[in-house]
């Protein structure tokens, strides 16, 4: 079944990636195309299982999916995997991308509430701005799952499905520690940090996970931060923008490294920022060495940089599995159960009722397991079925990017 889903995702993603270059707000707001239905025996069985008459659209339940933007690679993958897997399980899907604009996301969710969806899955653009909209969802009994990013200051969110976000950062910090042998080498090594979007609750977890591994080495002087920028606020990157990360790194290099100071590490929280940072190192750093650059996600351009030695690692998060666990939780909710630690899941995930307090309540969470990918372990990605080697056996491409 898993293999089947991967292949199916491939076909569905073709359409999405084809529209990826079109960055107009209308392409970032394409509602689901319910014509793209698949017909297989497996799907039919699932579909019949969910076709229980208790819904608003001819017997099928409808799931509303709100994704932040098409301009960052991973959300295209998430949206398509979710749509594909929910449809294969017999649900109708309404999928909207909101162009990284918070007002648009509120409007998009309001329109799904008006459409009487049976459940909402939301990857928030800004976790702080959805309280009123979600109160409206709660008033009409629509359950909400926060997808990947926690939604803050609301009691209307029932569950959170994500990866262990602190561990993502921790893996990046440990990679730096182990690669530079910080426990035995005297250094000093120079490091600069690039973190994520302050509006995204995940961004602090990533930064803290990495910083907590490295802070003792900073206080011992084995690691030095020539820019002095060691707080999340100082190194955050609004909207996780590649261009902004590029600009920030250019400024850092001009101000602190133009005298020949060596940069050993650029600790970047994710791949979109790592892309900008690697580009700045390429164009504006003259130190001669290739600094370690960390990332997260496994975006295609970054996997290429890993092959080319411009990025050292990425923390991989299998978002097809994330979609699968979300489906497990949603199915349980929609059939009247209260998911907990005993829920049977399609991928490994930890049930956590402590870590994610959104200011109003601790949101019960299912946290999937991230892992490190380096140049030497790219084949692990091929094993997922979601990537393959290109015709020259040099770079990885998505299994969706060619027929
Ligand atoms: C996700 C990361 C992603 C970032 C930017 C975060 O919320 O967890 O995987 O790199 O957003 O899209």
Image: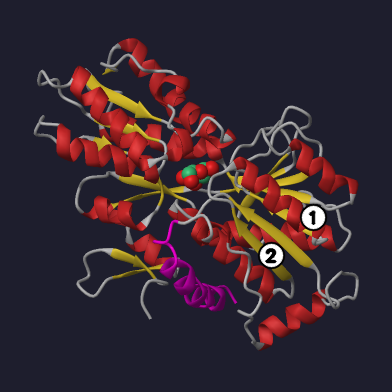
Quadrant containing the C terminus is: bottom left
- Considering only order in the chain, which callout, 2 or 1, is on the residue closer to the N terminus? 2
Between 171 and 191, the one lying in front of the other is 191
Cα separation, mark 1 vs mark 2, equals 11 Å
The residue to which callout 2 is attached is 94
Alpha-carbon neighbours of circle 2 within 10 Å: few (<14), some, or many (≥20)? many
Q: Position of residue 112 (x, y in %)?
A: 75, 57
- Residue 290 visible in rendering: no
Q: Secondary structure at mark 1?
A: helix
Q: Residue at x 81, y 57 (%)?
A: 114
Asked if the residue under mark 2 is in contact with the one under mark 1, i.e. CB atoms within 8 Å, the reply is no
Q: Position of residue 76 (x, y in %)?
A: 50, 59
Residue 371 visible to the viewer: yes
Instruction: Tell me the residue at 32%/58% (across/down).
Output: 378
Is label 2 in a helix, a strand or a loop? strand
Disc 1 CB within 8 Å of nearest ligand 1 atom: no
User: Residue 10, relative to residue 294: is it above or below?
Assistant: below
Against 190, residue 308 (above or below) is below
At x 64% / y 36%, what residue is drawn? 127
Within-10-Å neighbours for mark 1: few <14, some 14–19, many 20+: many
**What residue lies at 26% left-to-right and 56% top-to-bottom?**
304
For the stretch drawn in magenta, the main secondary structure is helix
The residue labelled by disc 1 is 113
The percent position of residue 91, horizontal first and vertical second, equals 74, 71
Queried whether the magenta region covers residue 98, the answer comes back as no
Q: Does 50 sit above or below residue 140?
A: below
Rendered image quadrant of residue 280: top left
Image coordinates for residue 148, horizontal then vertical, percent? 60, 47
Provide the residue span drawn in magenta. 1-23
């Amino acid at each position: 079944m898993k293999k089947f889903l991967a292949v199916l995702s491939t076909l569905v993603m073709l359409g999405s990636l084809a529209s990826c270059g079109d960055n107009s707000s209308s392409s970032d707001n394409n509602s689901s195309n319910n014509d793209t239905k698949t017909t297989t025996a497996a799907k039919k069985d699932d579909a019949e299982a969910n076709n229980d008459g208790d819904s608003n659209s001819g017997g099928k339940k409808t799931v509303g999916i709100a994704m932040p933007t098409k301009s960052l690679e991973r959300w295209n993958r998430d949206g398509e995997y979710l749509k594909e897997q929910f449809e294969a399980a017999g649900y109708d899907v309404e999928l909207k991308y909101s162009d990284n604009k918070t007002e648009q996301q509120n409007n998009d969710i309001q329109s799904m509430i008006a459409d009487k969806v049976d459940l909402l899955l939301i990857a928030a653009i800004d976790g702080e701005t959805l309280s009123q909209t979600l109160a409206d969802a709660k008033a009409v009994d629509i359950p909400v799952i926060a997808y990947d990013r926690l939604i803050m200051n609301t009691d209307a969110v029932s569950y959170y499905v994500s990866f262990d976000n602190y561990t993502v950062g921790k893996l990046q910090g440990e990679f730096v520690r182990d690669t530079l042998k910080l426990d035995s080498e005297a250094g000093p090594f120079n490091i600069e940090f690039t973190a994520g979007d302050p509006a995204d609750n995940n961004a602090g977890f990533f930064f803290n996970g990495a910083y907590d591994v490295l802070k003792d080495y900073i206080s011992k002087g084995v690691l030095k931060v020539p820019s002095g920028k060691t707080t999340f606020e100082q190194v955050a990157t609004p909207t996780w923008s590649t261009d902004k990360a590029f600009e920030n790194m250019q400024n850092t290099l001009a101000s602190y490294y133009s005298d020949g100071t060596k940069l050993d590490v650029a600790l970047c929280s994710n791949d979109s920022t790592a892309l900008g940072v690697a580009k700045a190192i390429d164009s504006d750093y003259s130190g001669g060495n290739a600094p370690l650059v960390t990332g997260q996600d496994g975006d295609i351009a970054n996997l290429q940089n890993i092959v080319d030695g411009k990025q050292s690692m990425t923390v991989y998060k299998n978002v097809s599995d994330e979609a699968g666990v979300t489906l497990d939780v949603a199915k349980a909710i929609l059939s009247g159960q209260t998911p907990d630690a005993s829920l049977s899941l399609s991928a490994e995930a930890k049930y956590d009722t402590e870590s994610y307090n959104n200011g109003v309540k601790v949101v019960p969470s299912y946290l999937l397991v991230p892992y490190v990918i380096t140049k030497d372990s790219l084949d692990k990605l091929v094993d997922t079925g979601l990537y393959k080697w290109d015709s020259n056996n040099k770079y990885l491409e998505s299994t969706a990017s060619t027929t």
